[in-house]
Amino acid sequence: MTDIPVVVVAAALYDSAGRLLAARRSAPPELAGRWELPGGKVEPGEPPERALVRELREELGVAAEPVARVPGEWPLKPGYVLRVWRTRLLSGEPEPLEDHDALRWLEPDEVWSVDWLDQDVPAVAAALEEA
Ligand code: 9L3
Ligand code: MG
């Protein structure tokens, strides 16, 4: 057992039109159907921003660049915390390659129209404040 939480990194990913990407989880069953900021776990020794770039390539097939950390940290299941970066899409059109079954680009007035994971609600709100 360790006290050090596993960091889960996620992207507030914006396109050039200023729309925010939401991704619908396909697993695990208790989270499936809910929407999240895409991302995943940092591997041991991996810099978090590199982990974020890797996760977006694996999950969505895109190249993206973290621009700024969103201040704050949000608890997930025990032993896990969520950190978020405002992230810019560099190339590629996101596709749900892994762990998701739908993607949506949200206009600013649509951001609260999807059923975000409870854990992601404060993170999305904080990302919008930084916009
Ligand atoms: N999680 C919550 N919000 C997010 C992300 C990317 C992840 N925006 C939670 C879901 C899982 C855990 O973190 O319980 C690990 O995420 P993943 O590796 O299954 O994406
Ligand atoms: Mg993931």
Image: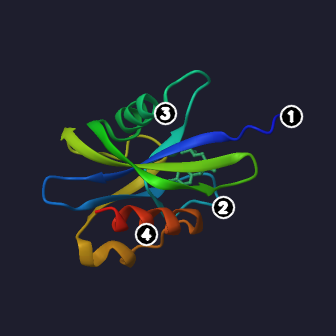
Marks 1 and 2 sit apart, C-alpha to C-alpha, by 25 Å
Marks 4 and 3 sit apart, C-alpha to C-alpha, by 21 Å
Vertical order, 17 against 58 (above or below): below
Residue 54 lies in what quarter of the image?
A: top left
Looking at the image, is mark 1 or mark 4 earlier in the sequence? 1
Quadrant where the image shows the N terminus: top right
Where is residue 130 drawn, in percent x and y?
A: 33, 62
Q: What secondary structure is found at the residue carrying circle 2?
A: loop
Q: Is residue 29 left or right of residue 55?
A: right
- Is there a contact, CB below 8 Å, between mark 1 and mark 3? no
Where is residue 26 drawn, in percent x and y?
A: 52, 54
- Is there a contact, CB below 8 Å, between mark 3 and mark 2? no
Vertical order, 25 against 110 (above or below): above
Where is residue 52 drawn, in percent x and y?
A: 42, 36
Q: What secondary structure is found at the residue carrying circle 3?
A: helix
Q: What secondary structure is found at the residue carrying circle 1?
A: loop
Query: What residue does disc 1 label?
Result: 1
- Is there a contact, CB below 8 Å, between mark 1 and mark 4? no
Looking at the image, is mark 3 or mark 2 earlier in the sequence? 2
* Residue 30, numbered label: 2
Mark 1 or mark 2, whichever is nearer to me: 1
Instruction: Give the residue at the far left of this rendering.
Output: 17
Marks 4 and 2 sit apart, C-alpha to C-alpha, by 23 Å
Which amino acid, mark 4? Ala
What residue is drawn where x is 37% and y is 57%? Answer: 102
Marks 1 and 3 sit apart, C-alpha to C-alpha, by 22 Å
Query: What residue does disc 4 label?
Result: 125
Query: What residue does disc 3 label?
Result: 48
Q: In this view, does 102 lie to the left or right of 29?
A: left
* Residue 9, numbered label: none
Marks 1 and 4 sit apart, C-alpha to C-alpha, by 32 Å
Marks 3 and 2 sit apart, C-alpha to C-alpha, by 26 Å
